[in-house]
Amino acid sequence: MPIERDPRWREFAFGEWEGLTWEQIAARWPAAAQHGLTAAKRYEPPGGDTFEAVCRRVCEALDEMRASNLERVLVVTHAGPLHAMLHSIFRERLTEMEQLVGLRFSPAGITRLRLDPDGAEILALNDVAHLL
């Protein structure tokens, strides 16, 4: 099968924060420090992506997948776009979503969804059984 590169699934662009530790970021941008390392929805790295910008591009990619009528699609991506995807799909179910926001995706973890015109169903979330 052909491999297609889709930049909408790329990780957050962290702009001036690229290559810095959280401690370095907090020292240089104290306003970011008050939200904490895992508060991606609240910070905006200078020259980087906001969480909402990542959500918009991931939503666009998901909408295109739904319209494609493909039965199976494999997406290889990073934790940021995965969080954006879950937030975008399950935005209407905020309580459930808040439990997922704290989720830390494992390297090589598999998340499987069934997409339909009205939403999605989680079939597997961050499954690492194949690594054992």
Image: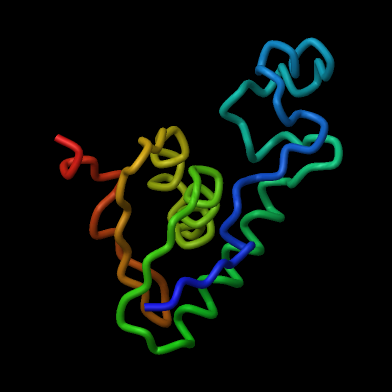
Residue 111: x and y, percent?
Answer: 32, 53
Determine which quarter of the picture holds residue 34: top right
Residue 22: x and y, percent?
Answer: 66, 17
Q: Residue at x 44, y 47 (%)?
A: 97
- Is 8 rendered above or below residue 23? below
Determine which quarter of the picture holds residue 31: top right
Q: Residue at x 64, y 40 (%)?
A: 41
Q: Nearer the viewer, residue 52 or 112?
A: 112
Residue 116: x and y, percent?
Answer: 37, 79
- Quadrant in which the C terminus appears: top left
Q: Nearer the viewer, residue 119 or 132?
A: 132
Determine which quarter of the picture holds residue 44: top right
Specify how the rendered protein is coloured.
Answer: rainbow
Q: Residue at x 63, y 62 (%)?
A: 7
Q: Is residue 110 left or right of residue 49?
A: left
The image shows a total of numbered marks equal to 0
Q: Residue at x 31, y 82 (%)?
A: 71
- Is 107 rendered above or below residue 117? above
Q: Is residue 90 left or right of residue 108?
A: right
- Is 4 rendered above or below residue 27? below
Q: Is residue 11 left or right of residue 30?
A: left
Which residue in the rendered view is the most extreme toward the front? 2
Residue 95: x and y, percent?
Answer: 42, 45
- Quadrant in which the N terminus appears: bottom left
